[in-house]
Image (spheres, helix red, strand yellow):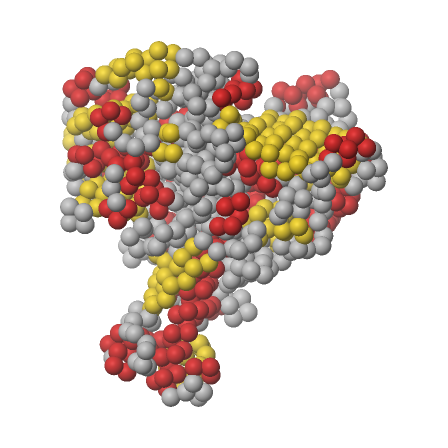
Amino acid sequence: MIQLVELVVNGERHDLAIEPRRTLVDVLRHDLGLTGTHVGCEHGICGACTVLVDGAPARACLIFAAQVEGAEIRTVESLAAPDGTLNDLQQCFSEHHGLQCGFCTPGMLMLAEGYLAEEPEPTTEEIRDVVASNLCRCTGYQTIVEAIDDCATRRRAAFQDRLDRSAS
Amino acid sequence: MAEPRFRRDGAWVGASVPRREDPRLLAGRGRFVDDITLPGMLHAQFVRSTEAHARLLAVDLDEVRAVPGVVAAYTAADLDLADITALLDRPAHEFVPTAMPVLARDTVRYVGEPVAVVVAKDPYAAEDGVEAAVVEYAPLEPVVSDLGALAEGAPLVHAGAPRNTLVDVSLFATEGIDDVFSEAHTVVEVRTKTGRQNALPLETRGVVADWDDRDEQLRVQTCSQVPHQVRTVLARCVGLDEKQVRVTVPDMGGGFGQKCVVGREEIAAAAAALRLRRPVKWIEDRRDALTAAFLAREQRYTVRAAFSADGEILGLDADVVCDMGAYSCYPFTAGIEPLMASAEMPGVYRVPAYRVRGRAVTTNKAPTAPYRGVSRPQYVMVVERVFEKAARALGIDAVELRRRNLITVFPYTGVNNITYDPGSYLESLDLCEKTLRDEGWFSRRSDENRVIGIGFACFSERTGYGSGAFAQRKMQVVPGFDISEIRMDLNGTVSVTTGTLSHGQSHETTMAQIVADRLGVPYDRVKIVQGDTDRITYGWGSFASRSITIGGSAVAAASVKLGDQLREIAAHLLGGDVESAVLEDGGVRVGSSWLSYADIADVAYLKAHLLPKGVGPGLAATASFDVGGDGTFSNATHGCVVELDPGTGGVEILRYVCVEDCGVAIHPQVVEGQARGGIAQGIAGALFEEVRYDDAGQPLAPSFMEYKVPTAREIPDVRIEHLETPCAFTENGAKGAGEGGTIGAPAAVLNAVNDALRHTGVELDDTPIPREAIFRALEVS
């Protein structure tokens, strides 16, 4: 059985003819060629497939593509500028050595993006709790937490800076 | 281009420069095996044994072939491939080889063993096909533990292996050791069982294979730590020449040893691609990765140690049994764990008498591969338990007891015939203890309202095993050397090959730093070529912390040779003599004149008639490196503070300090990352992860719900302090840094837990430490 599904990914509309059982992560990776989102367990634990669905982190391996018609989906490919310039979160991951093999990284980035959008002023312990949603086998997590913490601090400083400038 | 501000003392080596790997991986533009799609590509999955031990009566694939989307399905008989056999040069009473068929033929020996391969138009259809297979088994009694394997009258996993013993080697037996024990003031004994673990790279195993008519090659893209060994085995299995197989490795999501052996599924998928003349992809799913991939670490130790009254260790007597599962892995064999433990166990201590027997037994469980640290996390834990027990028996502080026995004069040749190069064994212990003391943990330990313990682990880790060291193990295939080819191109950019293979370790950055210093070019002008059997002379990949020690040395040596060529040409062109020519600022200075590399390359390639007599066109050099002696020893002391929860038996790690010495750190941030990641895996083994089986040999942890990989909640921040004892015989002064974290952590955690239990009289020596045992100990007290 084939179903017609319309997906909006990173602001772009796609029309797909797929089996209803096809997962979102398989559609992203193999039908749309967005291979930045990874598959680590296919049972919702490791979080390597984390993407944003309407702004909230979600496991793309546990969602059928047909379930998210009409939603705004964002993947790791949306983070860097078109010329390849990394965004502030990606830059922080690099500076803190928050990645080694890089396999969990897209999921960690999308988890953090979704979280920081919802909670711009987290404590380090709160960040640690959120990072505990996903698995990383290389880093021991410390540098991932530090990278997200640093990014949150920089974003707050930049926001304050904008406020100060608009006030003056 | 990276700014020179990243350089330390004018050198790239020693500076934590931005990683070359990062931008693509962060942008989601890496290329992992499952990211590869080829035109007309098919997808493979495996029919796997549901029995731990059985004769295969029939494998019926007719229904499979009728499933929509299925293109082909093959049994062992259909593919007719040679077996994978790894050998040691040892007599039959010491070593029994196993022939591991690519697909099971007449017997299955573990749940998950591949029985047939199904190839379909998409992965979903391949799984539908697998479900349609009908396999008839005649169950045999399974062997599911080391004790069961060795029991009188136990069923045999392999008919040719009596008592289910694949390796039985007594490497050392100091004369008179029984007298040492009978006359000793104090003898302590440690009995330990360590749990079976999965190295668990987050990217599961996988392959894309296709036959290329133009190249007349079977092209295999696979996430392997050892591409040349995959080529050798694959060529042998399918009956091709080595040059008819090209193995390349794309980005790789971790390996940790599980991918440093040759697996069966990649061979079967490649064989299917060869037969169908269409690309075939196989991506292991997590269930298979947890149950049917290579495992490790299930060992049993019975160790006695003799001490004098003043705490001098006099002797060590060890019996090691390793449950290696159903088959020997290629190229290391089932000897990998018992031989490692036997060869290295005296470790950092001056042990004058040593006897050891190491055995590998075969059981009806998934086979094993080397896993980060290989036996060292276990024997270090056992030896560190020995010191803790002896300290209690002798009434000497455990740290002080270690101090009295650590090797302090180097080079030191041990009772195990190994010469240890200089390290900072005592210094690292002192600094680790001081750090925890300064942070106030010793006073917090005495808080009577809390159950807090402090544990230490002292160890060294042989890294950079050269051919000589592996030959001592009597491997028939002897890894060790590395060959590097370097080339400078027209505009003065450099590309350099390495036979090692980065899969998270940052070689694109660190190897480039090494070349950059040797040639005086920025590190981002150096391209590292790795993981391609067509472009790289036979190499051994990355394992045993060999990459920077051996691969990095080969890269350095090749750079120096290229530098000599550049100097010779420049001296000729500038009219000076070679001796006075020096590499400087991306060019060569001869007296007061200077020629850029681009200028020299211009002559070498475009104006070859200007070259000196006897110098051929082009700019390229090849060099190799091997470690002649016993390798180089990194060392560290780990200190761990835990608090136990009397209500649950839970263990919380309050503090973790690692004082490490890997010689010259090429990239300190990368070294720290290796230490932290390694410690996380060591903690995982000490507290959480275990691959368990029931009495029928059914695996009990087929998902992440049962196989408990620790998260950011369980893994603590780690304070790292560096000491630097440069290695005298690697080209960069570096020692290996890949495994130490994993080696020290189980001992430090276990000692800390026992220290916290000191008031209970209970001592725990097994890992993962059973939470229930902690709960009961605290409940009774």
Residue B306: which quarter of the image? top right
Residue B132, horizontal then vertical, whole percent = 24, 17
| B600 displayed left or right of A92 | left
Residue B373 in sight in this render: yes
Residue drawn at x 41%, y 18% is B52
A120 vs B698: above or below: below
- Of residue B377 and residue B1, the one placed in the foreground of this image is B377
Left or right, B672 with reference to B56: right
Query: As drawn, is B645 to the left or to the right of B373?
Result: right
Q: Residue at x 57, y 28 (%)?
A: B321
Q: Quadrant of the N terminus of chain B?
A: bottom left
Give how far across and how far down residue B589 sits, in percent.
Answer: 43, 82
Residue A25 position within the rendered picture, expressed as x and y whole percent measured from the top left: 29, 34
Q: Position of residue B344 (x, y in %)?
A: 60, 42
Q: Quick one: quadrant of the C terminus of chain B?
A: top right
**Residue A28 appears anywhere in the view:** no
Name the residue nearer the viewer: A1 or B557.
B557
Residue at position x 58%, y 61% in the image: B728
Q: Which of the 4 image quarters holds residue B48?
A: top left
| Nearer the observer, B206 or B365 | B365
- Relative to residue B521, is residue B35 drawn left or right? left
Q: How many marks?
A: 0
